[in-house]
Image (tube, rainbow, N blue to C red):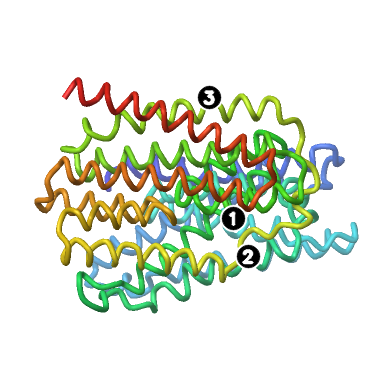
Amino acid sequence: MNDIELFQRFGLAIAIGALVGVERHWRERDEPQGQRTAGVRTFALIGMLGGGAGLLELALKSAGQVAGQIAGQFSGIVLVGLFLGFAATFTRFKLREAAAENDFSATTAIAAMLTYVLGAVAVLGDMRVAAAGGVVLATILASREALHGFMRTLTWPELRSAIVLLAMTLVILPLVPTDPIGPFGGISPARIWTLAILLAGVSFAGYVAVRVLGGSSGELVAGAAGGLLSSTAVSLANARRSTEQDAPDLLAAGVLTAGAVSYARTGVLIVLLAPALTGHVVPALAAGTLVMIALALLLARRGGALEGRQETRNPFELWSVLQMALLLAAIGFLARAAATWFGSTGTIVVSALAGFADVDAATLTVAGMATAGLPADTAAQAILAAVLSNTVAKAGYGLALGTWGFGWRFAAASAAALFAGFLGLIAGSALT
């Protein structure tokens, strides 16, 4: 490490302290002189202290290499010793301030310790990590009002759902077997659980979008988030909601947004996984996507406000999420089995049947089979059959489970999207 790099690292340590100090100083800017425990100057010095400790450690390490490792045996003592002395001194001052002001916040003390650590990392470790840590620390400190406001409005169902989602991802997923079980490629328990996590995550993201944005914007964002994984689930949920909430335009707009995202995602998957099918399928999907987006925006503009939603809705129901994940896994298994038993015809039929639940499994399965030798015409027909049956099924769910106002809006828009897709298919066939 040359002298220029040492100056850069030491300067970064000071800059991290100054950044955190600006936020702390700004928050107490109206306090009289001498009444602030730590402002911009103090935190800049704390960053310098951490960086200086790192420089001393480098010096000891260099001395150890020269003197037969004798001095190097004390590596770490300076860094830890200075940290303990600094932490004890700073904590004492904060305790005195807390007693005088009846303020029991430990935020500034912890921020000071982290500033010391980041200053040391800037000199001894990765400068990018240290810089990113400083920015994140300042951001968290500056977000006090937003975070406190969020905690005041947080409900128990939201907290419970967030904890369940984290447990599903960080605790259970690593323990689930990854090897497929059964014939025809089998079913992977880890894949089923991953699908459940994605479904729950999309539902939670959609819930947060509507809660934060509200009205038409939130409904469109929620629909788009739901469409990333299961537009069918969004259709079923909004159909049920239409019986409780008098907002058919907004609810239909959300479902159409989910459908448009589903169409677009299917097209992207085809381009990435089976590019040979692009000319056969993508023009039809693109035309249907544009029509759905246009109609969703039109309905959202007409829809007005949507009130009273969050009091009766949970971010996601775990059992429903697991059922959908199992269904998707079963559809993929049946598609592979039917292709083995009945050949190309079986693939098209099973894809069409799969579309009544969700188009994702059929798309992924058929795209993989196309790259393995399934004729392009057959693969394209199978994917389009899944998209067609899925669109018709969702419209049917809307009419059967939702109100008439919601159902006919959704069905009419779906029919318009299918007609546009048919025209796009003809245009694509003419070009290819």
Expressed as whole percent of the image width and height from the top left, the position of residue 343 reads 15, 58
Assign a secondary structure to mark 1.
helix
Expressed as whole percent of the image width and height from the top left, the position of residue 297 reads 59, 26
Say which mark, if any, is on residue 37: none
| Left or right of 198 on screen, residue 265 | left
Foreground residue, 236 or 64?
A: 236
Amino acid type, callout 2: Ser
Q: Mark 1 points at which residue?
A: 204
Q: Earlier in the sequence, mark 2 or mark 3?
A: 2
Q: Mark 2 points at which residue?
A: 161
| Left or right of 44 on screen, residue 1 | left
Residue 264 sits in quarter: top left
Up-down relation of residue 202 to residue 209 (above or below)? below
Callouts 2 and 1 close, C-beta under 8 Å? yes
Count of marks placed on residues: 3
Expressed as whole percent of the image width and height from the top left, the position of residue 86 reads 62, 63
Amino acid type, callout 1: Phe
Amino acid type, callout 3: Ala
Q: Mark 3 points at which residue?
A: 294
Q: Which residue shows up at 32% across the image and 71% down it? A: 71
Q: Which residue shows up at 75% across the image and 30% down it? A: 304
